[in-house]
Amino acid sequence: MTDLRVEGLLEVRRKLELLGKRSSPAISWSINQSLINARSVSNKQIRQQIVAKQADINRELVKKNAKPSTLVGTIETPKKGRPLSKYPFTELKRGGVSVKVKPTGGRIKLPAAVVVPASVMRYSKIKFIANRTPDRRFDWLYGPSISQVWTGVRDDDLVAFAEYFNRRLLFRIDYELSRL
């Protein structure tokens, strides 16, 4: 677990004591608002590091909301890599495949790879990029997972996420105090 020091926590603590029973819903609301912000900021950062559509990343960044009873909210991602066919690719004339994984770098050339059409795949509607094994089977090729990229983004922006959470929490506490 990462230790964060955020300005204004003493003020938050004093105001939470005034709220009493309403403090847990205020905290869970703040956590959920912070998760929404963290997810959108992370999405932008991830798209700066790999070539992916915003909708694909949003689908893989799963947000689990905090409840007043638990006060824990998370953003989870699948660990498995994305198929290389989800990245922009072209088939080379002399055989092989060229794939663009990073937006700033060059294309990766895979001379032994083949594009397997959807008709070969019984239950899939997308094409796959694979290598042939000596026994004529396919060895599917995967790129970096969203989880790998998101771990780096999360560590870089952790302090910013905590400061945003603190601002949202102060806003919600002031709102709840005005209702008393």
Image (tube, helix red, strand yellow):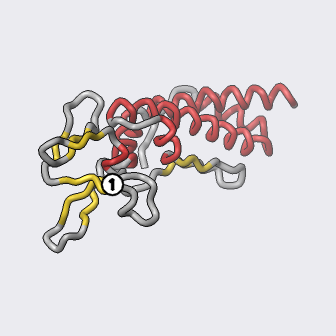
Disc 1: CA contacts within 10 A as few (<14), some (14-19) or many (>=20): many
Q: Name, please, the residue furthest toward the bottom.
A: 135
Give me the residue at 19% from left, 53% from top.
113
- From the viewer's side, name the closer residue of 144 and 92: 92
47 is higher (above) or lower (below) than 62: above
Residue 168 appears at what percent x and percent y?
64, 29
60 is higher (above) or lower (below) than 171: below
Give me the residue at 27% from left, 52% from top.
115
102 is higher (above) or lower (below) than 141: above
Give me the residue at 48% from left, 35% from top.
54
Residue 91 appears at what percent x and percent y?
23, 43
Q: Is residue 53 left or right of residue 114?
A: right
Circle 1 residue? 128
Residue 178 appears at what percent x and percent y?
83, 25
Q: Is residue 99 left or right of residue 163?
A: left
Residue 157: quarter of image: top left
Q: Is residue 107 left or right of residue 61?
A: left
Residue 118: quarter of image: bottom left
156 is higher (above) or lower (below) than 24: above
- From the viewer's side, name the closer residue of 91 and 98: 91
Label 1 amino acid? Phe
Give me the residue at 43% from left, 42% from top.
3
Number of numbered discs overlaid on the protein picture = 1
- Disc 1 element: strand
Quadrant in which the C terminus is drawn: top right
Residue 96 appears at what percent x and percent y?
17, 48
